[in-house]
C-alpha cells in the first residue's frame, strides 16, 4: 500500500475541475456538489476497508478475521495467570500503577478469557512469524522482534545439551507478554530442542564479570537478569 494514499473529497475535486467561465457560478457548483454528495461516504467506507484491516489498525471482528486466517484464537486458557492492577496484598497476580491494566467489570480470573485487541495483536504477530519460521536462531530472533516490535533480543545456548535461552530487554516486554511467551508454543524450536530459560536483561548496568562487553557493573551495583 502506498504511503501517500489519501482520501479524496469528491465534491471539492469536481468543483475544482469546472471550466473558468463556470467556476464562479454558485448554482452550478451546488448542482455539481449535489451530484457528488454520495461519493464521499462511499469513499470513506472504501478507505476504511483498505486502511483498517492491518494488524495495527484492525479492531474487533476485523481483528478476529485476521486471527482466523493465521490460525490464532482470541481466547487464552487460565487467565488467572495474567497480571492486573491491584494493591499490595491482593490475592492474585498484580502490579501497581502503570504496570498492568485494570480488570474489567464481570471479567473472570479463571478458565478462559478473551484477549483485548492490543493483547490479541501480539499473538497474531507471533503466530504469523511462527508459521514462517524455520526454527533457526535468526528466525527466532526475527519472530520475537516482529511480535514485540523490539530489536533488543538475544538467543544463547542453554546450560543443558540441546537447549537454548532467550533474552529480551526488560523495557521491551510487558508482564502479560512474559506470560504469553512462557505458557504458549509461539517460540519455534527444532525437533529435540527445548527452551532452557526466558529472561529479561537491563538496558544498562547489567551485572557481569570484568572483561565482558557492553555497559556492565560488578557486585552490589549491577542488575541481574530476570528469569520468567
Image (cartoon, rainbow, N blue to C red):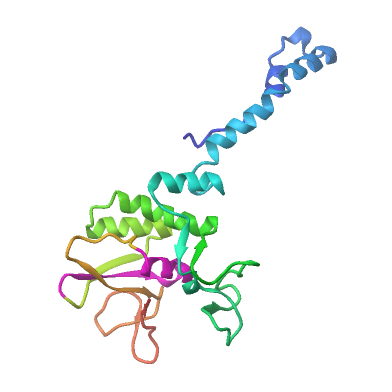
Please tell me whether residue 179 belongs to the stretch shown in magenta.
yes
The reply, left or right, for residue 122 in relation to residue 138 is right
Query: Which of these two is toward me, 70 or 47?
Result: 70
**Res. 190 image quadrant:** bottom left
From the viewer's side, name the closer residue of 53 and 110: 110
Q: Nearer the viewer, residue 68 or 10?
A: 68
Q: Is residue 69 visible?
A: yes
Q: Nearer the viewer, residue 155 or 122?
A: 122
Q: Position of residue 104 (x, y in %)?
A: 63, 66
- Identity of the residue furthest to the front in this view: 111
| Quadrant where the C terminus is found in the figure | bottom left
Magenta extent: 161-184
Residue at horizontal 45 percent and vertical 57 percent from the top: 122
- Could you tell me residue 22's position as x and y percent? 78, 9
Would residue 190 appear left or right of 71 to someone viewing this image?
A: left
Please say whether residue 124 is one of the residues in the magenta stretch.
Answer: no
Please report the residue visible at 37 percent of the width from the left and 58 percent of the height from the top: 145
Tell me residue 207's x, y (percent).
34, 83
**Residue visible at 71% across and 19% down in the picture:** 36
Residue 208, x across and y down, in percent: 30, 83
Side (left or right) of 30 relative to 225: right
Q: Residue furthest bottom?
A: 220
Please tell me whether residue 168 is drawn above or below residue 29 in the rendered image.
below
Q: Is residue 8 visible?
A: no
Using the rendered view, name the quadrant where residue 87 is placed.
bottom right
Is 146 on the left-hand or right-hand side of 9? left
83 w.r.t. 24: above or below: below
Residue furthest to the left in view is 161
Label tally? 0
Question: Residue sitting at 39 percent across and 47 percent down?
Answer: 70
Amino acid at each position: 500500500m502506498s504511503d501517500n494514499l489519501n482520501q479524496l473529497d469528491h465534491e471539492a475535486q469536481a468543483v475544482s475541475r469546472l471550466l473558468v467561465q463556470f467556476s464562479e457560478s454558485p448554482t452550478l457548483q451546488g448542482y455539481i456538489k449535489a451530484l457528488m454528495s454520495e461519493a464521499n461516504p462511499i469513499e470513506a467506507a472504501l478507505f476504511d476497508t483498505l486502511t483498517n484491516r492491518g494488524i495495527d489498525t484492525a479492531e474487533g471482528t476485523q481483528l478476529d478475521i485476521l486471527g482466523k486466517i493465521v490460525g490464532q484464537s482470541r481466547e487464552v486458557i487460565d487467565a488467572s495467570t495474567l497480571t492486573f492492577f491491584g494493591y499490595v496484598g491482593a490475592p492474585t497476580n498484580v502490579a501497581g500503577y502503570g504496570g498492568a491494566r485494570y480488570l474489567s467489570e464481570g471479567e473472570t480470573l479463571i478458565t478462559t478469557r478473551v484477549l483485548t485487541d492490543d493483547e490479541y495483536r501480539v499473538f497474531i504477530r507471533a503466530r504469523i512469524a511462527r508459521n514462517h519460521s524455520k526454527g533457526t536462531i535468526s528466525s527466532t530472533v526475527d519472530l520475537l522482534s516482529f511480535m514485540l516490535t523490539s530489536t533488543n533480543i538475544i538467543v544463547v545456548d542453554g546450560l543443558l545439551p540441546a537447549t537454548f535461552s532467550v533474552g529480551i530487554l526488560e523495557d521491551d516486554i510487558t508482564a502479560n507478554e512474559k506470560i504469553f511467551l512462557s505458557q504458549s508454543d509461539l517460540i519455534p524450536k527444532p525437533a529435540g530442542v527445548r527452551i532452557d530459560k526466558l529472561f529479561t536483561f537491563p538496558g544498562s548496568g547489567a551485572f557481569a564479570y570484568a572483561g565482558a562487553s557492553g555497559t556492565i557493573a560488578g557486585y552490589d551495583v549491577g542488575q541481574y537478569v530476570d528469569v520468567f
